[in-house]
Amino acid sequence: MKKEAITFAMTGASGAIYGMHLLKQLVNIYSQVHVLISDAARIVLATEVGLKIPEAPAKIKEVLVEYCDCDQDKIAVYAKENWYSPVASGSAAPKTMVICPASMGSVSAIATGASNNLLERAADVVLKEKGQLILVPREMPFSSIHLRNLLSLSEDGATIMPACPGFYTGPKTLEDIADFVSARVLNHLGIDNDLIEKWGYKGK
Ligand SMILES: Cc1cc2nc3c(=O)[nH]c(=O)nc-3n(C[C@H](O)[C@H](O)[C@H](O)COP(=O)(O)O)c2cc1C
């Protein structure tokens, strides 16, 4: 049975491959994926993955459906000021949201409850409704400001899963590295997966 809907967001941190890799998994697991992509994320996607993401939500959806090779109704994409979308209200929003990758700018806005765009508002809604918010931040180094914001979000119930792939699985490709991050996020969503070998089970 498919899991209920999830909100998935990408912001303008490096590591767009993690987000796209994870999205491919989510469309096979959830009945629907509500997608939010910041303008900066579109730039990073073009720079790092070579994926040109248009601005209009309907066009973004076309690109993502093709990339994920999934049914049209699997993915819903909303503009950054679409306050009438389900993710804008606690009465309709999925209880689960993943932001991968998460930029320090969006981390800061979410930590302070700014809700200046739909992505920030959607995260704010998940926190206020006591749902599950997972952030995959990426920056190097972290300043004290970044660390304080991340701590604040952790204390408010978010799960901070930095894009720090382990190398004990012997990754050979970028996809293997992205699999590691996706696998750990899926674990926290309660989804068993074989993307990486489970520690301690080798050869068993
Ligand atoms: C190629 C590229 C890589 C970037 N990498 C990072 C990063 O790793 N972490 C980060 O916090 N910001 C990074 N930035 C800067 C953010 O995109 C920028 O602060 C932006 O305003 C974030 O907006 P958003 O949170 O709405 O996506 C990067 C920008 C570009 C163009």
Image: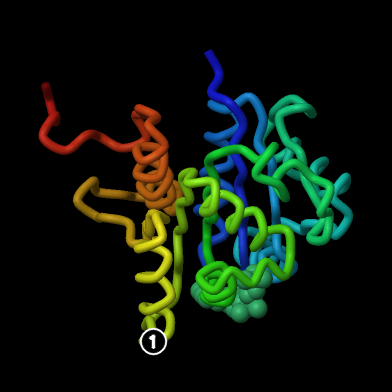
Residue 152 locus on image (x, y percent): 39, 70
Residue appearing at x 53%, y 34% in the figure: 25
Residue sitting nearer the eye, 117 or 58 = 117
The answer to whether 146 appears left or right of 54 in the picture is left
Residue appearing at x 68%, y 60% in the figure: 50
Q: Residue furthest top?
A: 1
Q: Quadrant of ligand 1?
A: bottom right
Q: Is residue 42 above or below residue 203?
A: below
Q: Is residue 47 visible?
A: no
Task: Give the residue number, with chain letter if any, for mark 1.
Answer: 143
Q: Secondary structure at mark 1?
A: loop
Viewport quadrant of the C terminus? top left
Q: Is residue 72 above or below residue 162?
A: above
The answer to whether 161 appears left or right of 74 in the picture is left
Amino acid type of the residue tagged 1 in the rendering:
Ser
Residue 92 locus on image (x, y percent): 69, 37
Residue appearing at x 31%, y 37% in the figure: 196
